[in-house]
Image (spheres, helix red, strand yellow):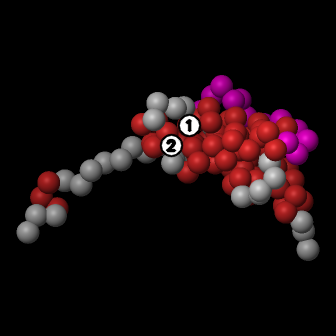
Amino acid sequence: MKTALQKLKDLWADRQYRQALKLAATWPRLGKHRDAIRGGWAAATNPVFYRQLGKDPDGMYTAGVLAVAERYGLPLPMFDPTVVHEPMKNYTQTYKPPKEGNNAK
C-alpha cells in the first residue's frame, strides 16, 4: 500500500499538480507553507470568489504549487508560473445569473 507521501510524489511525477495540491492541502502538518498550500487549493476550487476579494487566484494557485514543491523537496513544476496554466482555465468561468423569465410563475 502506498503512503500519502508516495501518492503525492507519483502525482507530481505525472505532472498532476492540481491533484497533488489537493492532496497536500488536506494534511495537518504543512509548517510555514500551510497558508500558501491551502490558499492555493481554495483559489483553484473557487477562483471567482477570490477575484471578488481582489486577489489573483492564478497567482495563489501557483504559490500553492511552488510551496508543495519546496515543502516536500520536489522538483519545480513544468509550467511557467507567469502564464495562466491549463488547470485554472477550466475553473475561471464567471457566474451567470438566471434569466428573468425562468423562475416566474
Residue type beneath disc 1: Pro
Q: Residue at x 89, y 59 (%)?
A: 6
Q: Which residues are magenta?
A: 71-84
Which quadrant, please, contains the N terminus? Answer: bottom right
48 in the magenta segment: no
User: Callout 1: helix, strand or loop?
Assistant: helix
User: Callout 2: helix, strand or loop?
Assistant: helix
Disc number placed over residue 57 in the picture, else none: 1
Q: Residue at x 12, y 58 (%)?
A: 101
Disc number placed over residue 103 in the picture, else none: none
Q: Callout 2: 10 Å neighbours few (<14), some, many (20+)?
A: many
Residue 53 appearing in the image = yes
Question: What residue does disc 2 label?
Answer: 47
From the top left corner, tell me how far across and down residue 97 is, in percent: 27, 50
From the top left corner, tell me how far across and down residue 59 is, in percent: 62, 32
From the top left corner, tell me how far across and down residue 76 is, in percent: 83, 35
Q: Residue at x 42, y 37 (%)?
A: 52
Q: Residue at x 24, y 55 (%)?
A: 98
83 in the magenta segment: yes
Magenta residues, dominant SS class: loop
**Is 8 displayed left or right of 91 in the figure?**
right
Which quadrant would residue 66 be assigned to in this image?
top right
Q: Is residue 33 above or below residue 3?
A: above
Which quadrant, please, contains the C terminus? Answer: bottom left
Residue type beneath disc 2: Pro
